[in-house]
Image (spheres, rainbow, N blue to C red):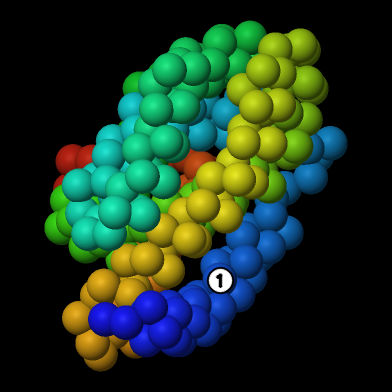
Amino acid sequence: MTPELRRSFVAATQTRTVPLHDQIDGAIQDLLASCPDPTRLSADERRGIIARYAAVLEGNFIYWMTAAQLASASAEAHAIIRDNLLEEVRDNHPGMLRRFALAAHAIPTDTDVLAVHRNLQNVRLFVGRLSGVKIVLMMAFFEGWITRFMPYLAELARRQGSTEQEYTDVHGVCDVVHTQELFRALDAEMALAPAPLPPATQLLEGVGLLRTLIENIVHFSGGVGSDRLSGARTT
């Protein structure tokens, strides 16, 4: 492929990613707008949101980003995701999150883990299919949501009496860059994907599953986690 043709092809690919970017931005805005007012939450409700967030993020974020690395085909995506993973591991981001949850008296319990179990498993099953474009798109959405969720999460912790803000301070900044870089990775992956690309509804499959999981983190009302885990029917 000549340089001129390559530039033309990349430009066309980037044009295709704009609607996806817009849909993801809209989904993030909807999620943030749906978050309950921290001033109206009880201490137990605040603790639950932080704990469910930690239950999902601490043991899964690096796993999902590693899947994106394994599934991606482009050298650019590999380099971008590798840098992301290097930062996560080198700076011990799971440890940051654990300290954050501990200081807010929100270490996940069995109840918190069960509360997100079903929707978490749905995301894991999706990630296990190793669809490069779809996973990179999901992780771009995730990074974008995380960075914009950090002020809210920090406020919940503050109201729990915590002064430990390293996790929220770091991710409120670094994930802005990570989001931008993952959209660059998405451009590169879409440029290599076989034509024609699936419709947006299919490409956003992982985003939809992860959005449901995030709603579960923020809005879980209790009483269904163990039923879903065991397969028992609820009435």
Q: Is residue 138 visible?
A: no
Residue 132 percent location from the top left of the image: 26, 61
- Residue at 78 percent across and 21 percent down: it is 158
- Residue at 42 percent across and 52 percent down: it is 139
- Residue at 37 percent across and 66 percent down: it is 188
Q: Is residue 40 visible?
A: yes
Quarter in which the C terminus is drawn: bottom left
Comparing 40 with 56, the one in front is 56
Comparing 63 with 159, the one in front is 63
Q: Decide: is 215 above or below 155.
A: below
- Residue at 41 percent across and 58 percent down: it is 185
**Image check: 131 left or right of 224?**
left
Quarter in which the N terminus is drawn: bottom left
Q: Quadrant of residue 234?
A: bottom left
Mark 1: amino acid: His
Q: Secondary structure at mark 1?
A: helix
Q: Which residue is mark 1?
A: 21
Label 1 packing within 10 angstroms: few (<14), some (14-19), many (20+): some
Q: Quadrant of residue 89?
A: top left
Comparing 197 with 4, the one in front is 4
Comparing 72 with 153, the one in front is 72
View extreme (bottom): residue: 196
Residue 7 percent location from the top left of the image: 44, 80
**Image check: 30 left or right of 67?**
right
**Image check: 47 left or right of 151?**
left
